[in-house]
Amino acid sequence: MDWWNLIVGFFIANVLGYGGGPASIPLMYNEIVNHYKWLNNEDFSNILALGNSLPGPIATKIAAFVGFDVWSWPGMLLALAATIVPSAIALIVLLKLLHKHRQSPVVKGMSLLVQPVIAVMMLLLTWQMADSSIGSSGIWHTIGIAAVAYWAMERRKIHPAFVVCAAFIYGGLVLSHVV
């Protein structure tokens, strides 16, 4: 039943992930790590970091990797289809509907009031990843890497892909001797 679980897991995560890839990441995390246990927290964090450093949507990269890992090439194709097809169909239908009712206060309210829920989901995922990082590399390395990453991306405007690659290199060269 791995093939069915791939379809259901990625379908649920991506259909309920209102707001795109970043909003669906906590839902994918829940399905991949907590529910089906296809990956552990550390592996998911690595996929997320590496996936964010590559071009293209994060949800499809995660689906492709996990699908392939679980059930080879057919698993990759099923996970990708479950990720892409429902959203593509929904986009076409909903955009037609939203365009028709774009001045409705209900439609405007729906779009605005879902944003705090997405923010909380992202905050919870950040907390879980920070907790995992503190557990594996220590609080000072975690705080230091987070501070440098913030400074590099927000203050120096360095592309996140370069920051992620630098963190991988730092982890490989420095933390491999500490941990």
Image: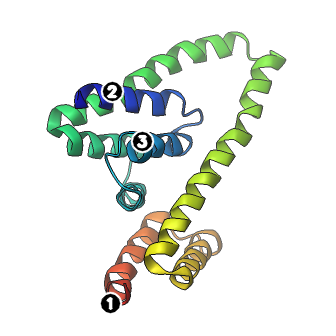
User: Badge 3: how crowded within 10 Å, few (<14), some, or many (20+)?
Assistant: many
Distance in Å between CA atoms under marks 2 and 3: 14 Å
What amino acid is found at the position of numbered circle 2 in the picture? Ile
Q: Quadrant of residue 164?
A: bottom left
Q: Earlier in the sequence, mark 2 or mark 3?
A: 2
Q: Quadrant of residue 162?
A: bottom left
User: Badge 1: how crowded within 10 Å, few (<14), some, or many (20+)?
Assistant: few
What amino acid is found at the position of numbered circle 1 in the picture? His
Residue positioned 56% across, 79% down in the render: 148
Residue 57 appears in the figure: no
Q: Earlier in the sequence, mark 2 or mark 1?
A: 2
- Residue 22: x and y in percent read 54, 46
Q: Quadrant of the N terminus?
A: top left
Looking at this view, is 21 or 15 the one in front? 15
Distance in Å between CA atoms under marks 2 and 1: 40 Å
| Residue position marked by numbered label 3 in the rendering | 59
Residue positioned 53% across, 77% down in the render: 142
| Residue position marked by numbered label 1 in the rendering | 177
Residue 108 appears in the figure: yes
Q: Quadrant of the C terminus?
A: bottom left
User: Badge 2: how crowded within 10 Å, few (<14), some, or many (20+)?
Assistant: some
Looking at this view, is 91 or 144 the one in front? 144
| Residue position marked by numbered label 2 in the rendering | 7
- Residue 73: x and y in percent read 16, 37
- Residue 114: x and y in percent read 71, 33
- Residue 29 horizontal side relative to residue 5, left or right: right
State the SS at label 1.
helix
What amino acid is found at the position of numbered circle 3 in the picture? Ala
Residue 7 versus residue 139 in the image, above or below? above
State the SS at label 3.
helix
